[in-house]
Amino acid sequence: MDKLFYGKQTVEEDDIQAVVDVLKGPLITCGPKVVEFEKRLCEYTGANYAVAVSSGTAALHCACIAAGIGPGDEVITTPITFAASANCALYCGATPVFADIDPDTYNIDTNSIRKNITQKTKAIIAVDYTGQVVEVNTIRQICDEHNLIFIEDAAHSIGSSYNGVKVGNIADYTTFSFHPVKTITGGEGGAILTNDGSAYKRLLLARGHGITHDKDLMEDLPHEGIWCYEQIGLGYNYRMTDFQSAMLISQLGKIERFKERRREISKKYELAFKDIQGIILQKTIPESDTCRHIFVIQLDLDKLTCTRREFFDEMSAKNIQCQVHYIPVYWFPYYQKMGYKRGLCPVAENVYRGILSIPLYPLLTDEEVDYVIYTIKSLVEKYCIK
C-alpha cells in the first residue's frame, strides 16, 4: 500500500484545465478570475464581501489591519493553532494573549477568554480547530459586552456551519486558507470575508499596497485618466493570481462532494474508536455542522505503555504518516524570548501531549481507511496497560 498522509490535495483534470485556460489567456494576475472567485465565495457563504489574497496568513494580517489593530492593543487567541493566528497580531504591533482551550472540543475556552480580557483587548481571533466551529454565540456576546472585534480564523472550516449559518457569514471578519491540505485548494491562497462595506474597502487597501484607483478615495492628485492612482495607506502585495482563482472556482464547485467524503471517513473513525481504551476523541457541539479538515485522536498516555513518538514512528513504519496539530504557539523560542512561559495554558499543554492527526482526505479509499483503523487498533492493543 502506498504511503498515506494526514492530508492530501484532490486535484482533478478540470481543475488543471481551468489553470491551463488562464495561463493561455491575456491576464494571469489582477484579472477577472479573482473577481469571479470572490463572487462565488460570497454566493457560497452568504457573506456580502470577499477579498482573495495570497495565503491564509495574509488573510489574517489583512483582517487585523482592517480591524484597526495596532501597538498597545491585545488580541486573544488560542495556543493550539498554526503560528499565524498569533503572528498576525505581532505584524500590527499588538500583543497576542493566549486563552486556554476546552478539554473536550479543543476549541478556545470562552471562560478563559473572559479571564484574559483587559482594557487593552481589541479583538478575539477564534480558530475553528479541525473544522468544528467555535462557540459563536458566546464569543459574539463577549465581543458585544466589551466592544471587541470578532475575527474567525476559519482556515480549517470552509464548508462548516453554525446553527445553519455558513462559516464566512458569522464573524466581523472570517479568514480562509487554501493550502493544499485544506478542503479546497489553489496550491496556496486565502480570503477574508465580511459583511461591512467600509471594512471591505480597508481590506482592499491592505491587500494592494494601500493604493487605490477609486477617484472618490483619492485625496490630492487630479483624476486625469485610468492611469491615475494614489497610495492613501500602508498596504502589502497580498494579491492572488488568476490561475489560482480559476483552480479555486473549479474546486469550490466540488466542495459539497469533498465535504461528504470527509464526513464519511470521519464517521467511520468515530465509530471505530469511540469505545477504545487508550484513545480519546474530540467531542463535537450540536451547533456545529462540521466539515473536518483534519481528524485528531488523543492518545491517553496514562493507559498506554508507549510514548506518542513511539506510536507515531510505528504508524510511519506501516506507511501511515501522521502529524501533530499543534505545538502550543507560545512554546516556540521566538515567543519564549518575548516572555511567554510554559504552563500558561495547562489544558492546551496536556491535550498537546497526546494528539495525533490521522489520514483524512477525499482520495482515501474505504480499504485505506480500514487499514488506518486496523493499524491504530492493533497498536493500542499492543501498548494498552492490561
Image: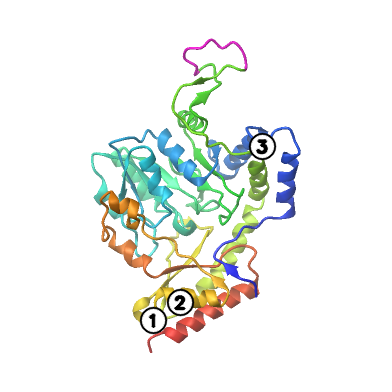
Q: Is residue 145 above or below residue 81?
A: above
Q: Which residue is mark 1?
A: 304
Q: Is residue 380 above or below residue 220?
A: below
Does residue 385 appear left or right of residue 226 in this picture? left
Q: Secondary structure at mark 1?
A: loop
Report if the CB atoms under discs 3 and 1 are less than 8 Å apart.
Answer: no
Quadrant including the C terminus: bottom left
Report if the CB atoms under discs 1 and 2 are less than 8 Å apart.
Answer: yes
Q: Nearer the viewer, residue 135 or 347?
A: 347
Q: Which residue is mark 2?
A: 311
The percent coordinates of residue 325 (x first, y second) are 44, 61
Q: Amino acid at mark 3?
A: Lys
Say which label, 3 or 1, has the lower sequence index.
3
Does residue 317 appear left or right of residue 340 in this picture? right
Find the magenta span and give its range: 217-226
Res 274 visible: no
- Say which of marks 2 and 3 sits in front: 2
